[in-house]
Amino acid sequence: MFMKRLKEETRGYHDALEANPLLSHMMSDQVSRAHYCGVLERFYGYYLPLESALEQIGDIDDLELNFNQRRKAIALASDLRALGYAQAKIEQLPCCEQLPALESLPAALGALYVTEGATLGGQLIRRHLKRKLSIDEDSGCAFFASYGDKVGPMWQDFRALVERYAGDHSAEDEIVAAVVETYATFDAWLSASPLIAAMR
């Protein structure tokens, strides 16, 4: 089963991203509103150009995954506005330039495996932020509340699509490579945040 292989071969990169200081501090009891805003800035700076790059893959709609429904940058911008950011400030936030190479549908599925998988952990983060910062999906946590009670079915639909596509197109290796590259570039982008230097 390809999805089992995919998880096993990319586990180290997933774990490294999860252990990133920016994210681990967000899940600590010491998380502050300012730190959370900094995390959202970095997420927005990665997701916005990533989704723009995915959009350039002309036949992405052929995957039948409803790409527009799975976009996340719009929720991140909404969260920043809810937390007091002016639109002009959001538009001036730095964006990541070292993205994974997204030139094919298998590469797109690899990148989306990372962003879609993040919606599962997002539910845990959402509950933590509500306890510690009294923030919910209407006041700055829409991104981590992605899909609401449909997060499970949305993930299962995506998993089935990847499994089917990989088998039909002999695309296993290309998808695995794209997942690794997406985890690695996202981790590097988060690690470059000025917040990490301030935490030391």
Image (cartoon, helix red, strand yellow):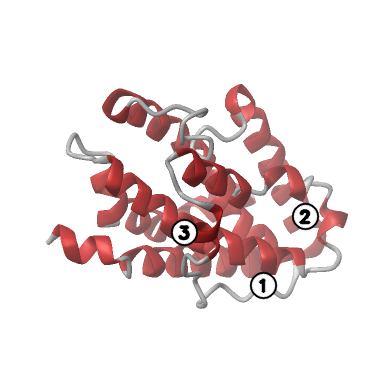
Q: Label 3, label 1: how many angstroms apart (C-alpha)?
A: 18 Å
Query: Residue, x 19% and y 66% (percent of image)?
Result: 197
- Residue type at mark 1 is Leu
Residue 143, placed above or below residue 2: above
Q: Residues within 10 Å of mark 2 (few under 14, many from 20)?
A: some
- What is the secondary structure assignment of the residue under circle 1? loop
What residue is disc 3 on? 10
Q: Residue 116: where, in percent of width, then height?
A: 59, 46
Label disc, if present, on residue 165 of the rendered structure: 2
Q: Residue lying furthest left in this view? A: 200
Horizontal side of 199 relative to 175 (left or right) equals left
- What is the secondary structure assignment of the residue under circle 2? helix
Q: Is residue 5 visible?
A: no
Q: Label 2, label 3: how many angstroms apart (C-alpha)?
A: 19 Å
Q: Residue 98: where, in percent of width, then height?
A: 50, 77
Label disc, if present, on residue 102 of the rendered structure: 1
- Residue 48 in which image quadrant: bottom right
- Residue type at mark 3 is Thr
Horizontal side of 145 relative to 61 (left or right) equals left
Query: Residue, x 60% and y 30% (percent of image)?
Result: 151
Q: Earlier in the sequence, mark 2 or mark 3?
A: 3
- What is the secondary structure assignment of the residue under circle 3? helix
Q: Residues within 10 Å of mark 3 (few under 14, many from 20)?
A: some
Q: Residues within 10 Å of mark 1 (few under 14, many from 20)?
A: many
Q: Earlier in the sequence, mark 2 or mark 1?
A: 1
Query: Residue, x 46% and y 55% (percent of image)?
Result: 43
